[in-house]
Every structure is written in C-alpha cells, then in structure tokens.
C-alpha cells in the first residue's frame, strides 16, 4: 500500500533552519510532533543523511541537530503540499519561541569578585548571588496499592499533564503517547525507559530526566510516590538533578535560596526551568556537606565554602550593586555607550525579521549591524513585492542599516534551489557563491533592497567572500541590477563579511574595493580553528589569545569602517580587549544591548 502511495503522490520538500541555541531538543520536537500527527500524509525530517519519522518523538531526537543546522522537511501523500506549508510555518514559530527562552549565561560583570576564602569554580545556570547553608535534597518513597494498570496510569498521567502550561510538560505528554501499548508490567516499563535513555545521543543525555519524570508520574498513579524533603530554613538546595515536575514544588518553597545541580547540563530541562523561574543556580559536580555555609556567586562563577564575615559583606555589597546595575542598564538603554576615557562605541543590533527589529529599537540599538535576510526565504520563494514590503517596514525603524545578502546553501538547501549534495558542505556552495547557482534569486533580492531604501543610505554586505575577484564580481552584478532597472544607487554602500582567514592577509587589496567590513567572528573562528561550529566535543574558543591576535590584526590593518557582529561582540570577557584594540562598532542580539552598553561605560 505504501509503495502505491509513493507512486500516486508527489513528494514535497522544504528547508528548516534550527535557529535556536538549544538545538533540536525535546520541547520543540514534542510540539512539532503533536502538530505533525494531525496530518494523514507521510512526514519525515532529514538531517546529515538520516531520515526520521516526524510523527515519532524518539525518532526525531536521534537526529542530533544543533544550533544553525539545516533540516529538510519531506511530505508525501494526501494534502502533502498543504501539510508542508503549514508545518514549515509551525516549525519556524516553535523555533523562534524556543530561541526567545534561550538565556545568555555570560556573567554581566567582567571584574570577578575577590573573596578572602579560597573559592571554587562552577558553571552558572542563572546569574545572581545568594548566601545560605547547604541542604542536600532528600527523597522518600511511599507505596499504596491503587490496583490501576500501567495503561490506566499512563492515561491519568497524560490527563494530568494537559493541565500544565509549560512546553516541557507538553513534551512529556508526547513521550507518554509514544509508549507502546504492549507495555503492561513494571519491568517492561523500566526496560522501555532504560532503552529510550540509552538511545539518546550524547548531546541529549541530560534529557534522561524527562523519561524518569514520566516514569515517576506513571508510578505515582499506581501508588508508588516520591516525596521531596525541602529545607525548613533558607538554604541552597544541592542534588544530582531535578525532574521538571519537581521544579514547581521547589520554586513554591520560601526556603530555597539557590540550587546547585551535580549532574546536569545548561541545556537540560531542569536548567531551562530554573532560568525561567529566575532561581540563582549553577552546576558543580562535587559533594557538599549539609549546613555548610556557602556563597553562591554565579556572576563570578564562584562558590565560597565557609566564607569569612568579610566575604559575606563583599557578597552582599556585590548583590546590591548587581540589582542597581540591572535597573540602571534598562533605564539608560537609549543613551550612548561611552567609555570612561570618552570613547564612543556604536552599538547596533543583529536582527532576523521585523519583530526582532522592533525589539532592537526598544532595547536601545543605534541601528542594524546585521540584517539576516534568510528569514524571508525559508518557507517559500518570496516575490519581489513581498521582499520590498518587509524591507520597507524594517528600514523605517533605523537610519543605520546593514543588510546581508542571502546566506544559505552548504549542508542543506532551500527546496527551490538545486545544489548537489556536498561531502563537506561547510566548505561548499554558500554565501556569495550562490551567485553562480541562482543569480536571479540574488538579483531580485538586490532589486527589492534598492526599491525599499527610498534613497535612504543602506549598506549591502556580501557573505563568505574569500578573494577580491569574488567581491568584484558580486559588486559588478549588483551595479548591473541597478542599471538594468534604471535605479540610482549612489546612496548604497557595498561591503563584506570577514569570515575566512584568506581575507585577513589581503586586507590591503580589499581596502581598495570595499566601503566597509564586518567581522563575522563565529565563522571566522570556525575556519581559523578548523572546527565545525556546534561540534559536540571540540570548541571554537573566541577568547583564545591567538584568535584575539587575529582580530587585533584585522582591526589594525583594515582601513575601511569596521564592525564586529559575531557572538564575541556580546561577550564581556573580551569586550574590554576589543575596545582597547580599537574596535568602535559592535552588533549584538537585541536582548543583550542594555547590559553591554553598561559594560562599555565601565571600560
């Protein structure tokens, strides 16, 4: 029957971009699966050569897709085209919502608080400072026979989860729905849970707590319940990890002043919920004794055990300073960022659509340093007028705007672009190289920018340029588009991203061609370290002294206006160094702008 279906129905494809720092984790997957199940057609997700059933939550989790990875959505069967369009939009919405919940864990102060007592390094989950004794979480088990079957208990657990609002619990409901109807004994349930946890990819091992949580829920309806013993006085709770269902109970306790997890990750659901509830928390894998007084200072990545009175006074002073600073940063977000030496730093925003442009305006951005235009192209091929209308809405918000031309290709392509599969897509057809593959697509985009600019000065930036010939070709193409359409573009400037090492050593030649540069530190690090972004074990460390030397070289030798728009621009650990190198323009995520402006005023 399936073979017949494949013969009768056309197959549809669409590119999906995983634009959330959390990657393809349980929460967004569950939401997407629940929507996919509403359609009768076959629906699959493809990534890195693997194709998985999009109606099976466990199957999708095995894809191991990370931030900025590109997946392909396949539909085939009854109403497949409609399903493709609606699921593409649903995926984009789900991922945008998830990205908004991703929290920057970089400490807001570059100066570490110094304590007289020896301090211990830890990994912060949510920033803050709290002083309290340690309380190791205790759990007791109580058993009462309810005579319910496992399937009846599962049904009750699903009904219970339907009353909870958080997406994480919606994800758990999908996990419960995936449990085989043939599981009818506690042993089979345990074997199933163990199997699913074992199948989790390395980067999702922290999601094991969700399986444990639903197991506990089922058991509780069968009369086997676990009860938390919480502190009777203000304490810092210490435990291996927390189940999502336990977080609410902990947050409702007036005596949990902070949380230390011993076996968790920053992307685990326990960490996500702790951040969402604003609980000062961190990850530290060593045991701590009950009633030991500690200072949990996640701003300084520090744990102070048995602090002196001087340390306690210091921590209290830092806490008061933090609270005042956060309030001041928000109040001053629309003021200029000027260092103590009187140097003004222009703070722009990285945006991806009209909503993020509005957020940037609200957060005090002085312009747009990077408009990622890809958002218009992911769901369908936009018409010229569609592009003009969207650009116009964004252009009216700011006087200083830089638009990056379409930067797709590589490992996954837009469904309407025919690019052969590449063995190493990160070294393949992407960025400005699309000009050789889909010139009409770039031509229409450029024309839309010209029309929307309405004589306002706009900067157009070409991505992934490696040689001067590539830039010359791209600019000549852009000028020809203007000439063919009889449009005056004397108000348009043309620049490029610095993302490949080859450009760095030919800046003298590029200076004669470009109007401006923008350092894309994320890709520049990727190609400098020869490490793929998002690699599960290797790290492109943008704070590495050798990489900072490379950035310093660029700043000193580029003789055209220069900005930095990669993630390092919002990293307080290197901000002072970037300014001392001569950097005077940075472009950031809108949400980080008030804090980074305040950081600049302290330099």
Image: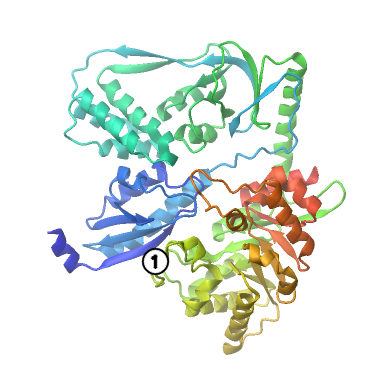
Whether residue 399 is visible: no
Residue 279 picture quarter:
top right
In this picture the colour scheme is rainbow
Going by the image, does 191 lie left or right of 282? left
Going by the image, does 570 lie left or right of 73? right
In this view, the residue in front, 9 or 119, is 119
Tally of numbered tags: 1
Residue sitting farthest toward the right = 341
Compared to residue 555, the image places residue 197 above or below, namely above
Secondary structure beneath disc 1? loop
Going by the image, does 84 lie left or right of 167? left
**Residue 224 point in image, percent of width and height:** 29, 17
Q: Residues within 10 Å of mark 1 (few under 14, many from 20)?
A: some
Compared to residue 391, the image places residue 157 above or below, namely above
Q: Which residue is mark 1?
A: 421
**Residue 393 point in image, percent of width and height:** 58, 66
Whether residue 409 is visible: yes
Residue 249 picture quarter:
top left
What residue sits 70% from the left and 32% below the top?
Answer: 323
**Residue 487 point in image, percent of width and height:** 62, 85
For the C terminus, give its image quadrant. top right
**Residue 516 point in image, percent of width and height:** 71, 69
What residue sits 58% from the left and 58% below the top?
Answer: 527
Residue 73 picture quarter:
bottom left
In this view, the residue in front, 105 or 422, is 422
What residue sits 33% from the left and 38% below the top?
Answer: 199
For the N terminus, give its image quadrant. bottom left
What residue sits 48% from the left and 16% below the top?
Answer: 137
């Amino acid at each position: 029957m399936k073979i017949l279906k494949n013969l009768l129905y056309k197959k549809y494809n669409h590119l999906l971009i995983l634009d959330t720092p959390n990657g393809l984790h349980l929460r967004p997957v569950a939401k997407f699966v629940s929507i996919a199940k509403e359609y009768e057609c076959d629906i699959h997700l493809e990534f890195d050569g693997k194709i998985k059933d999009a109606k099976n939550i466990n199957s999708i989790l095995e894809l191991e897709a990370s931030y900025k990875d590109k997946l392909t959505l396949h539909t085939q069967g009854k109403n497949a085209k409609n399903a493709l369009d609606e699921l593409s939009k649903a995926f984009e919405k789900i991922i945008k919502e998830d990205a908004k919940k991703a929290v920057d864990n970089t400490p807001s102060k570059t100066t570490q608080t110094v304590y007289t007592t020896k301090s211990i390094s830890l990994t912060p989950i949510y920033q803050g400072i709290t002083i309290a004794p340690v309380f190791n979480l205790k759990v007791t088990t109580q058993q009462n026979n309810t005579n319910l079957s496992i399937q009846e208990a599962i049904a009750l657990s699903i009904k219970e989860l339907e009353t909870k609002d958080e997406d994480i619990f919606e994800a758990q409901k999908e996990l419960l729905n995936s449990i085989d109807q043939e599981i009818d004994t506690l042993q089979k349930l345990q074997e199933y849970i163990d199997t699913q946890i074992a199948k989790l990819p390395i980067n999702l091992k922290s999601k094991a707590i969700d399986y444990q949580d639903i197991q506990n829920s089922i058991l509780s309806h069968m009369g086997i319940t676990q009860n938390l013993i919480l502190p009777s006085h203000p304490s810092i709770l210490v435990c291996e990890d927390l189940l999502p269902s336990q977080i609410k109970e902990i947050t409702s306790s007036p005596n949990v002043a902070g949380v230390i997890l011993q076996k968790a990750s920053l992307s685990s659901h326990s960490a996500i919920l702790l951040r969402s509830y604003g609980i000062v928390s961190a990850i530290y894998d060593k045991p701590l004794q009950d009633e030991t007084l500690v200072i949990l200072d996640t701003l300084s990545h520090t744990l102070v055990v048995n602090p002196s009175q001087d340390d306690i006074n210091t921590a209290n002073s830092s806490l008061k300073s933090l609270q005042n600073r956060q309030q001041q940063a928000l109040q001053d977000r629309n003021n200029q960022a000027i260092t103590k030496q009187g140097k003004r730093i222009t703070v722009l925003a990285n945006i991806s659509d009209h909503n993020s442009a509005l957020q940037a305006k609200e957060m005090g951005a002085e312009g747009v340093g990077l408009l990622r235009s890809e958002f218009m192209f992911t769901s369908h091929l936009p018409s010229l007028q569609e592009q003009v209308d969207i650009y116009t809405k964004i252009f009216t918000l700011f006087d200083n705007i830089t638009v990056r031309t379409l930067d797709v290709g590589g490992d996954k392509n837009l469904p309407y672009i025919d690019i052969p599969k590449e063995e190493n897509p990160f070294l393949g057809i992407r960025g400005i190289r699309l000009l050789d593959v889909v010139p009409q697509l770039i031509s229409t985009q450029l024309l839309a920018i010209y029309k929307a600019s309405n004589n306002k000065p706009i900067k157009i930036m070409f991505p992934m340029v490696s040689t001067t010939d590539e830039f010359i070709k791209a600019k000549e193409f852009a000028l020809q588009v203007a000439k063919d359409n009889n449009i005056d573009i004397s108000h348009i400037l043309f620049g490029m991203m610095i993302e490949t090492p080859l450009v760095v050593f030919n800046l003298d030649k590029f200076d004669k061609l470009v109007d401006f540069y923008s350092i894309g530190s994320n890709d520049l690090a990727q190609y400098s370290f020869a490490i793929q972004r998002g690699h599960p074990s290797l790290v492109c460390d943008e704070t590495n002294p050798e990489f900072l030397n490379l950035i310093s070289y660029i700043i000193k030798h580029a003789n055209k206006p220069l900005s930095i728009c990669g993630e390092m621009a919002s990293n307080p650990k290197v901000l002072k160094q970037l300014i001392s190198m001569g950097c005077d323009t940075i472009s950031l995520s809108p949400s980080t702008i008030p804090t980074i402006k305040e950081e600049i005023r302290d330099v």
